[in-house]
Image: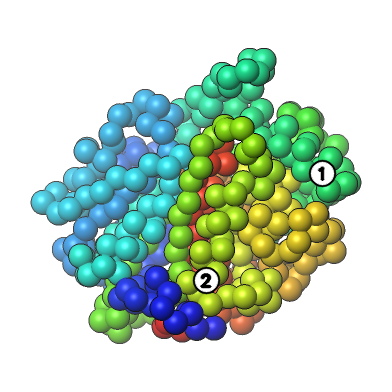
Amino acid sequence: MSPAAGSTTSSKRPVAVVGVGQTKHVAARRDVSIAGLLREAAQRALDDAELTWAEVDAVVIGKAPDFFEGVMMPELYLADALGAVGKPMFRVHTAGSVGGSTTLVATNLVAAGIHGTVLTVAFEKQSESNAMWGLSLPVPFQAPLTAGAGGFFAPHVRAYMRRTGAPDHIGSLVAFKDRRNALKNPKAHVQDHKLTLEQVRTSPMLWDPIRYSETCPSSDGACALVLTGEEGARRAPRPPAWVLAGAMRSEPTIFAGKDYVSPQAGRDCAADLYRQAGITDPRRQIDAVEMYVPFSWYEPMWLENLGFCEPGEGWKLVEAGVTAMDGDLPVNPSGGVLSSNPIGASGMIRFAEAALQVRGEAGEHQIDGARTAMGHAYGGGAQFFSMWIVGSEKP
């Protein structure tokens, strides 16, 4: 695959991912502070790239809302832990999509020639927060019954089922698939070797039609990437992942006529991404997808939103096994957000896992022959979208 002539990406300097680091994602990391958590992921990314802190020119950090942990502007005190004292440091915030947006900001700093090598980090320590109640916000003109993100998104899942005729069991199929994939990923938080499909189907109903086992966990974790240009990629000890395209879009959370099932901003973001990368048939040209799916029903919904199939066909791909590890469009071989959800880092993990796939370094959850992979993130009330496509060949 090659980028389209005149695309946004090809007019910039090539950017490569040469370092990837993640913590082990768990329910609670009581052995480290927030600074220690970030330092752990960042050090692993630098070790992967065989670089030192002194060789980093700038740092870009992202996390979900500050009120989750109650630490306002954490980047100010985290500069010390990230070796950023005396260097440019940037903070990004786009709710749940922030890990993806943060990566793209860092990418553009290299692509524009502003900095040669950039370290980007994203994190969340949910054990020191209460995201459930932090996200139980009153919605205008609605009864005050929204409880957490699931309470907000459940009506949209029900609308998808009504619109497409998707049967009840589709959500369980996605959750069981991702939890099985997570068993191959040592970094994944939820690893239940005894889980059965029947247990997923009969787990307690939390927000109708979303069941307990169809919901993401609350995780502590961090992710870091080292991004650099052609010269840095030549010096890298391991194969780089080349950034072929990156795009962000946003729209209001609520407005008259908004399509909550398939937001316009998501469709526009994917279209821009494919244009930059010269992709005309994403289902056939992309080898693996790391998709932001915090509730299992969002896999078929995003399959349609991202143009992998026609509207109303997403659940049929899930039912046919197309998105399984051995399907022709593997989705979330890492186990996805359903298996690890340090919110601020979840989007960057999607981007990092896509990079690992095209570097051939995803371990047991490696997709054979993956040369082009997509990372996807969304946030807020399905209002922020960030995506990238990476490949094994330089654009």
Rendered residue at 74%/63% (across/down): 309
Number of numbered markers:
2
In this rendering, would 249 be left or right of 18? Answer: right
> Badge 1: how crowded within 10 Å, few (<14), some, or many (20+)?
few
Residue 31, compared with residue 371, is above or below; it is: above
Q: Position of residue 126 (x, y in %)?
A: 48, 34
In this rendering, would 159 be left or right of 13? Answer: right
Q: Secondary structure at mark 1?
A: helix
In depth, the one of 159 and 216 nearer the eye is 159
Q: Secondary structure at mark 2?
A: helix
Rendered residue at 75%/71% (across/down): 327
Name the N-terminal-most of marks 2 and 1: 1
Task: Report the quarter where the C terminus lies.
Answer: bottom left
Residue 61, compared with residue 34, is above or below; it is: below
Inter-mark Cα distance, 2 to 1 = 29 Å
Kindly tell me whether residue 372 is visible in this rendering: yes
In this rendering, would 226 be left or right of 300? Answer: left
Task: Report the quarter where the N terminus lies.
Answer: bottom right
Dot 2 corresponds to which residue? Answer: 275
Q: Position of residue 92 (x, y in %)?
A: 34, 45
Q: Which mark is residue 363?
A: none
Residue 2, compared with residue 324, is above or below; it is: below
In depth, the one of 234 and 112 nearer the eye is 112
Which amino acid type is shown beneath numbered disc 2?
A: Arg
Which amino acid type is shown beneath numbered disc 1?
A: Arg
Q: Which mark is residue 163?
A: 1
Q: Which image quadrant is residue 103 in? A: bottom left
